[in-house]
Image (cartoon, rainbow, N blue to C red):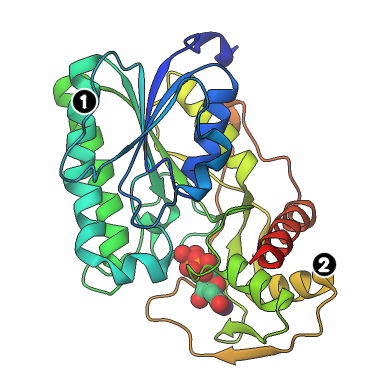
Amino acid sequence: MLAGRRLLMARVVVAGGAGFLGSHLCERLVGRGDEVVCLDDLSTGTEENLSELSGAAGFTLVVADVSEQVPVEGPVDAVFHLASPASPVAYLARPMETLAAGSEGTRRLLELAARRGARLVLASTSEVYGDPEVHPQPEGYRGNVDPVGPRSVYDEAKRFAEALTMAAHRALGVDVGIARIFNTYGPRLAPGDGRVVSNFCVQALSGQPLTVHGDGTQTRSFCYVDDQVDGLLALLGAPVTGPVNIGNPDERSVGELAETVLSLTGSCSTVEHGPLPVDDPRRRCPDISLARRVLGWEPTVPLDEGLARTVSWFRERLGAA
Ligand code: UDP
């Protein structure tokens, strides 16, 4: 039903397309026949993530920082805004750039969408809920974010990006969709970006201790990247503004994740506990009733299966290195 609204052979701009999630999205769009212009400043994304696409018909990489310029000529049917450092280690190392990507980057991409009559899908985040007092988190929950805490550079950038997107929708009539993305994992997570899944996989496969922050009882809900891309494409093709949570409601503790990675890798690594980062949310789990209802979407890849695919990718990558 919703797929019927998809534009055949659309021209799609993917800002942040050289990142972990962006590169999977670009591959899927090119695979279904769309033309893709990937904009990325390669600050956290890499050309290596796009190696499957290099030389592919209908794919172009333009190296540019969208908070400074959006050099795209010609018609545009859709814009995805995924351009931002996304892991805590990456955004804490680039606080000003992260705020600029959410503010100026969003404004420039909305202007592009307005000028070309394109639909814009904003990659927002579960971080807009901060350390939530409502569990699981529905879209109507307004969040518990410390506006001056260290994580605010990412959380408030995304909250502002949502506000800007809604303002462009209301004031300028831009066709928009806002996705609130929960923790996503899979092949091509950057080994050094500090996320829990990449850290545990690398540590388990190289015999180092798994670094659990705090007592490991904090929870996250992990969505396999293919499911996440399905959700984003469903939002692109649906007449839905959102925000809509796109994530997997299978909630796990960080300690449980460590045990699962140890058992999947057959690793003899130990588990070491360290300090919990400032403002680290205690728990996080999406309420995806809205996505099920308006997008007809829900995740299908169980954690064990997605982690097994991810581990095998890391095994190959570490072997090659
Ligand atoms: N975490 C951990 N060990 C690590 C990296 C992260 O215990 O080596 C914890 C982190 O403190 C948080 C959870 O795992 O409680 C998820 O962290 P991640 O950086 O992957 O994502 P986010 O905090 O943005 O959800």
If the image is split into quadrants, where does the C terminus sit?
bottom right
Return the residue at label 1: 112
- Determine the residue positioned at 38% across, 46% down: 124
- Determine the residue positioned at 28% across, 42% down: 162
Q: CA distance from mark 2 to mark 1?
A: 45 Å
Residue 291 shows in this picture:
no
In the rendered structure, are the residues bearing label 2 and label 1 in contact, judged by CB atoms less than 8 Å apart?
A: no
Residue 26 badge = none
**176 with respect to 100 (left or right):** right
For badge 2, the amino acid type reads Leu
Query: Against 260, is 9 above or below?
Result: above
**102 with respect to 68 (left or right):** right
If the image is split into quadrants, where does the N terminus sit?
top right
Mark 2 element type: helix
Q: Whole-percent x and y of residue 264?
A: 82, 67
Mark 1 element type: helix
**306 with respect to 197 (left or right):** right
Query: Against 176, is 278 above or below?
Result: below
Give the image quarter of residue 242. Answer: top left
- Determine the residue positioned at 43% across, 45% down: 18
Q: Is mark 2 within 8 Å of ligand 1?
A: no
Quick one: label 2, few (<14), some, or many (20+) residues within 10 Å? some
Q: Whole-percent x and y of residue 245?
A: 49, 43
**25 with respect to 170 (left or right):** right
For badge 1, the amino acid type reads Leu
Return the residue at label 2: 264
Quick one: label 1, few (<14), some, or many (20+) residues within 10 Å? many
Of mark 2 and mark 1, the one earlier in the sequence is: 1
